[in-house]
Image (cartoon, rainbow, N blue to C red):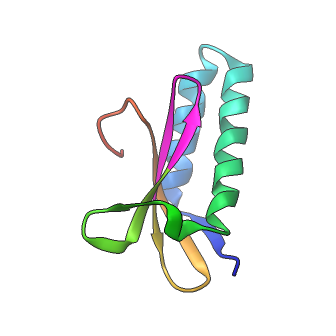
Amino acid sequence: MTFKVRLTDEARDDLRRLYRFLAERDIPAAERALESIERHLDFLRHSPFSCRKVGDSSLIRELVIPFGGAGYVALFSIDDRRTVTVAAFRHQREDDYH
């Protein structure tokens, strides 16, 4: 079964924020980070239930995206048998989702 992966406007804003932060220091690294995030989002198309649960819900989960010494985390929900919605992204060293 293949899931459609949607991003909320907030998740898209997070990606832009994370990209800008890294691009101010290293544009090639920022490009590689986005490529890594895209590859891992492709993983959600096939195996969203293998990601770690958030709280008591089995349908709210986090995808850990390794990159460099830390990486990123994507918060997503499994909406139905065909759709996954990414609500937010954050760097692993950030306190919480923004």
Where does the image place residue 90, in percent across and percent down from the top left?
A: 44, 41
Residue 86 visible in the current orientation: yes
Total numbered labels placed on residues in the image: 0
Q: Which residues are magenta?
A: 64-75
Q: Position of residue 70 (x, y in %)?
A: 49, 28
Farthest residue, direction top: 25
Q: Is residue 86 above or below residue 69?
A: below
The image quadrant that residue 58 belongs to is bottom left
Q: Is residue 52 left or right of residue 13?
A: left
Which residue is nearer to you in this view: 91 or 10? 91
Q: x%, y% of residue 86?
A: 51, 61
Q: Left or right? Give the position of 79 relative to 44.
A: left
Q: Residue at horizontal 60%, vertical 13%?
A: 25
Query: In this orientation, does residue 85 appear?
Result: no
User: From the viewer's perspective, is residue 63 above or below residue 37?
Assistant: below
Residue visible at 58% across and 78% down in the picture: 83
61 within the magenta span:
no
Residue 47 pos. (x, y %): 61, 67
